[in-house]
């Protein structure tokens, strides 16, 4: 996995900080996380797609139960989206998720 360039990382952190994150109540016990919805999170569609594009470019695959998912580590969170199997995940994604991580596994880029 490539390290996120500092200019890109700064821009991503700005977008992430601007977004209105919603706590996922239905997964509070099994997989606590937050999410944003395209068109409903204080980001333009372009800004939302910039986040998804970065998640597609700077990721590491990790298992989640029996499936493999792409995760991107930024600060104290790992981020992922659910459109990885769509024809164009950057424009097709409507959700971006994040979960707080206490310890980053070795091999993750530091942000």
Image: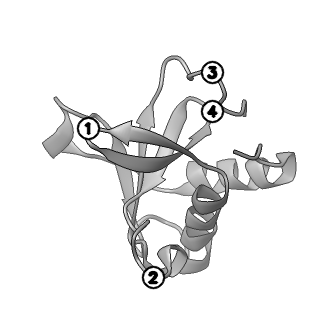
The image quadrant that residue 55 belongs to is bottom right
Query: Residue 71, position in %: x, y?
Result: 51, 45
Residue 1 numbered mark, or none: none
| Of pointers 2 and 3, the one earlier in the residue sequence | 2
Q: In this view, does 4 lie to the left or right of 95?
A: right
- Spatial distance from mark 4 to mark 1, Cα to Cα? 24 Å
Residue drawn at (50%, 81%), measured in percent from left and top? 88
Residue projecting furthest to the top: 103
55, above or below 63, in the image? below
* Residue 79 image position (x, y, % from top left): 49, 46
Q: Mark 1 points at which residue?
A: 65
**Precedes in sequence: disc 4 or disc 1:** 1
Name the N-terminal-most of marks 4 and 3: 4
The secondary element bearing badge 3 is classed as loop
Q: Which of marks 2 and 4 is in front?
A: 2
The percent position of residue 57, horizontal first and vertical second, equals 66, 59
* Residue at mark 3: 106
Q: As drawn, which residue projects farthest toward the front?
A: 66
Q: In this view, does 58 lie to the left or right of 36?
A: right
Quote the CA–CA distance across marks 2 and 1.
Answer: 24 Å
Q: Residue at x 67, y 47 (%)?
A: 13
Choose the circle earlier in sequence order: 3 or 1: 1
- Badge 3 local density, few (<14 within 10 Å), some, or many (20+)? few
* Mark 4, residue position: 75
Q: Check the picture and name the quadrant holding the N terminus.
A: top right
Q: Pointer 2: what residue?
A: 87
Task: Tell me the distance, in whole angstroms, between the alpha carbons under discs 2 and 3.
Answer: 31 Å
Using the image as rendered, state which of residue 101 and residue 2 is in the foreground. 2
């Amino acid at each position: 996995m490539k390290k996120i360039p500092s200019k890109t990382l700064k821009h991503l952190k700005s977008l992430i900080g601007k977004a209105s994150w919603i706590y996922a109540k239905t997964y509070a016990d099994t997989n606590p996380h937050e999410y944003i919805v395209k068109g409903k999170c204080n980001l333009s569609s372009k800004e939302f797609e910039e986040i998804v594009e970065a998640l597609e470019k700077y990721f590491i695959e990790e298992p989640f139960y029996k499936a493999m998912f792409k995760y991107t580590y930024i600060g104290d969170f790992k981020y992922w989206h659910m459109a990885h199997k769509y024809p164009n995940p950057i424009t097709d994604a409507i959700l971006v998720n994040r979960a707080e991580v206490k310890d980053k596994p070795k091999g993750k880029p530091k942000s």
